[in-house]
Amino acid sequence: MIYNSGTSISEKQIYKYNKNGNIIEESVYQSGGILFHKKTYKYDNYGNMTEFISRMPTIKSIPTTLESREYFSIKPKN
């Protein structure tokens, strides 16, 4: 949690992990419980990250969700 100069919370981050201990979701909330940013992660059977998605939810003045995706691949050694 991130606090303002006083004692009120300005931001809260919640993390979810899979059974292997890899982070699979990160949600960032502003004060008042408003979702500000959400990140999701996917992994292959070896624990290598294969996908990362970053989303910022709809803002009243922007009628869409902003999304960024990255994909990763690991080439096996010969």
Image (spheres, grey):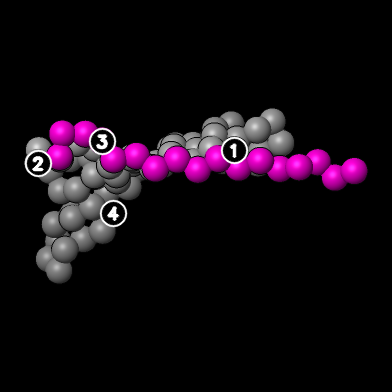
In the picture of the structure, the residue carrying the numbered disc 2 is 61
Dot placed on the residue nearer the N-terminal end, 1 or 3: 1
Q: Position of residue 47 (x, y in %)?
A: 66, 39
Q: Can residue 49 be seen in this view?
A: no
Separation (CA) of disc 1 from disc 4: 28 Å
Mark 4 lies on residue: 1
State the CA–CA distance, disc 1 to disc 2. 33 Å
Magenta stretch, residue numbers:
62-78
Considering every residue shown, the one lying at the far bottom of the view is 5
* Predominant SS along the magenta part: loop
| Pointer 3 residue | 65
Number of the front mark, 1 or 2: 2
Percent across and percent down for residue 67 are 34, 39
Of the pair 34 and 6, the residue shown nearer to us: 34
Amino acid carrying label 4: it is Met
Quadrant for the N terminus, please: bottom left
